[in-house]
Image (cartoon, rainbow, N blue to C red):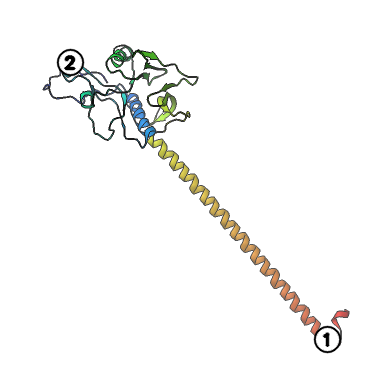
Amino acid sequence: METLSPYLKLPKDELIYDDGEPLETNRHRIAMNVLIDSVYQAFLPRQDFFAGGNMFVYYSATQRMNRDFRGPDFFVTLNVDGTLDRKAWIVWQENGRYPDVIVELMSDSTANIDKTDKKTLYEQVFKTREYYIYDPYDATSLQGWRLNGQQTYTEIIADQRGWLFCETLQLYLGTWEGKVLNESAFWLRFYDLQGNLVLLPKEEAEIEYQRAEMERQRAEMERQRAEMERRQAEMERRQAEMERQRAETERERAERLAARLKELGVDPNEI
């Protein structure tokens, strides 16, 4: 999201919250929402942070009509009241707080300014702790910088997985190949300290559904097993009853035979 055009005329005390300019592509829009949703998912149930995207950051109350505002594609500010409804991030209304982490989603038309002018602004004016850039159409484009002791940006070196560690959020930033909202791409995603992908709410719901379905199937299999065992026990009971009845019949037949032999004067024990 670019800065406002200079020809816009507004009352000096009025702010703009939407310049009417959409993100570069639908993939850029999805990529932004993936980052926002991931942070909120990773930080649950915390409410001491704010994550936004494609919204203006106003940082000069006196020169706000002189293009002194930017619209980062994604940013996070920690240790603030995350329950407030904000149309923009207005620094002088946030006790002078600037975003702690910013990600710009590059395109062919914005890559140069993302790497130069914005990087300088975020380093020298915003003093944003960490700044990252990524082109959703180029899986190799991820770069990041972190403020060092001299308050200047030092490039963050990727690990063997190609991920960058975001110290501020205590999360890794790395690519993930897959489908989000029916679009397949290499998405910029967050990973936790153990290397697990931070799942989106929909992904969490799908996993929970699969877990519930597996539990349902397991319970059904257990019910069927119990039913089979019940039937087997019933068959064994019936078999035992038949055996008992057969033995009883055999005993009664033997008793009748012995009685008849006695009637005939024959001792059954001598047969």
Q: Which mark, by number, is residue 66?
A: 2
* Residue under pointer 1: 262
Q: Residue 50 at x, y = what percent?
A: 30, 30
User: Could you classify mark 1 by the number of other residues whose Cα lies within 10 Å: few (under 14), some (14-19), or many (20 or more)?
Assistant: few
Tell which tag, 2 or 1, sits nearer the viewer.
Answer: 2
Q: Is residue 146 left or right of 256 when viewed as pictured? A: left
Specify the amino acid type for callout 1.
Lys
Q: Is residue 44 left or right of 158 when viewed as pictured? A: left
Q: Residue 118 at x, y = what percent?
A: 29, 15
Instruction: Give the Cα separation between the discs numbered 2 and 1.
Output: 129 Å
Q: Residue at 60% across / 60% down in the picture? A: 231
Query: Relative to 257, is 7 above or below?
Result: above
Q: Nearer the viewer, residue 167 or 117?
A: 167
User: Could you classify mark 2 by the number of other residues whose Cα lies within 10 Å: few (under 14), some (14-19), or many (20 or more)?
Assistant: few
Q: Which mark, by number, is residue 22?
A: none
Q: Residue 149 at x, y = what percent?
A: 37, 14
Element type where label 1 sits in the image: helix
